[in-house]
Image: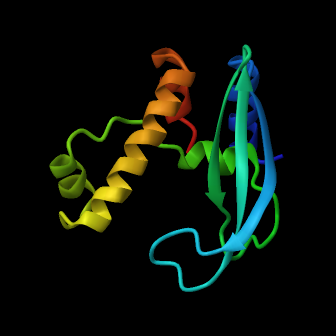
């Protein structure tokens, strides 16, 4: 087990969180995708609550189930602020298409920040 997998597993154990992934479909996941990739539904559960998200696996990893580390490292762990702040920080132009991306990022952060406490989020941010 490498150190990244260990970090993720320790975080899940410390927060009493269970992780699972299952195949969803093969298709285009990101707006800029030109190659289809395997997309999985990844679910985190704890204390009778859960949240799920779609995860587009890397092309190189193919149909390999994403590990907890893969998903935890990619989660939105910070509030991105306004749409203007988001575009400025991440290099996006202020377009309708990018506004949809912004709203998806905000929705993911809302799920993450309501699922784990601020103290737990600090530990989650250390997983890299």
Please report the residue visible at 43 percent of the width from the left and 40 percent of the height from the top: 107
**Residue drawn at (37%, 57%) of the image:** 101
Answer left or right for 115 relative to 91. right
Residue 24 vertical position relative to residue 110 in the rendered view, above or below: below
In the image, taking residue 92 as reference, residue 61 lies left or right, namely right
In-front residue for pair 41/59: 41
Q: Position of residue 115 (x, y in %)?
A: 57, 23
Q: In the figure, 85 relative to 18: above or below?
A: below
Percent of width and height locating residue 26: 73, 73
Identify whether 6 is placed above or below 122. below
Viewport quadrant of the C terminus: top right
Q: Position of residue 75 (x, y in %)?
A: 53, 44
Q: Quadrant of residue 11?
A: top right
Q: Residue at the spot x=15%, y=51% of the render?
A: 84
Which image quadrant for residue 35?
bottom right
Residue sticking out furthest to the bottom = 34
């Amino acid at each position: 087990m490498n150190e990244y997998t260990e970090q993720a597993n320790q975080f899940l154990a410390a927060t009493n969180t269970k992780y699972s992934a299952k195949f969803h479909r093969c298709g285009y996941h990101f707006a800029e995708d030109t190659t289809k990739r395997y997309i999985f539904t990844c679910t985190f559960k704890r204390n009778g609550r859960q949240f799920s998200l779609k995860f587009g696996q890397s092309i190189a990893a193919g149909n390999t189930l994403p590990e907890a580390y893969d998903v935890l490292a990619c989660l939105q762990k910070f509030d991105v602020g306004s749409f203007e702040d988001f575009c400025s920080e991440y290099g996006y132009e202020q377009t309708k298409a990018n506004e949809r991306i912004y709203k998806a990022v905000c929705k993911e952060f809302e799920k993450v920040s309501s699922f784990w406490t601020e103290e737990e989020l600090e530990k989650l941010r250390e997983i890299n």
